[in-house]
Image: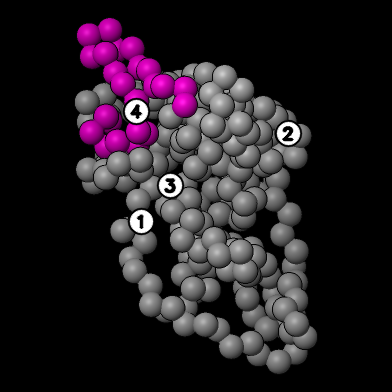
Amino acid sequence: MTKIAVLSTVIGNLEDIYNILQTNQYDKVLTIAKAYSSNLVVQYLLKRFYTYNPKRYIGKGYRLKPVDAAILITDAFESIHKNTSIPMKTFMKEKLVSGIKVDFKTKEVSIDPSKAANFITKFFAVSDRNAKKPELRFLEFRNIAYGNYQYLSIDELQKSYKSVPQEFQIGGSIFDSLSGELISGPEISKTTYQYHDPDGIDVFEDDPIPPQSQQNIQLDEIA
């Protein structure tokens, strides 16, 4: 199976696929795409960013301090726990975020701000400024979705803020950007790639227990 074919299952247009391959982001984008479709905390944050004043994150250089990243992630845990039937202990076993802690007596959720910042950096379009200087560190948003690529799993959230050209040109060949169909010019050979099952890609901070409880939960249930 080619890299292009694999990426086409998670990315919605040829231009993005081409740019991903040109910048050697293939494995990274597959990791991100899997998180966008399966990690409940990532899904909660995506919906929150795209729903509440999304323009401040897109090209505005919005800054997020680690302590505020920690608040976002604890809010996500508490909201998901409140709006789903997943027991907190089961939720913790799935290891959606490294470093998250729960006091099961008080139900208080906490996370070290630096680990919260690492989590946001891993899955979103941010620059990690002063990463080695904790007292000066902040995350600067360049966009919301990593790379501003068109991820199929979040298309409904993203489509109002993601412009996709109808055509894409590589050399003398012009393609339909969405279908990948050759419109004019010579065909371009595709590099083949021996691909491993994307389910083997780690989108968690630690090795997760297979989260059966995630399978039928929709984004609107964790808003």
Screen quadrant of the N terminus? bottom left
Which element is circle 2 on? loop
| Residue occupying the point 58% across, 88% down | 189
Reading the image, the residue beneath label 1 is 201
Separation (CA) of disc 3 from disc 2:
24 Å
Residue type pointed to by label 2: Gly
Tell me which numbered mark, 3 or 2, is placed earlier along the sequence.
3
To which residue does mark 3 refer?
35
The residue segment tinted magenta is: 91-114
- Spatial separation of the CA atoms under disc 2 and disc 4: 27 Å
Residue 31 at x, y percent in the picture: 44, 53
Separation of marks 1 and 3 at Cα, in angstroms: 10 Å
Residue 113 in the image, given as x and y percentages of width and height = 47, 22
Circle 1: is it few (<14), some (14-19), or many (20+) Cα within 10 Å? Answer: some
> Mark 2 and mark 1: span between their CA atoms?
30 Å
Q: Secondary structure at mark 1?
A: loop
Of circles 3 and 4, the one toward us is 4
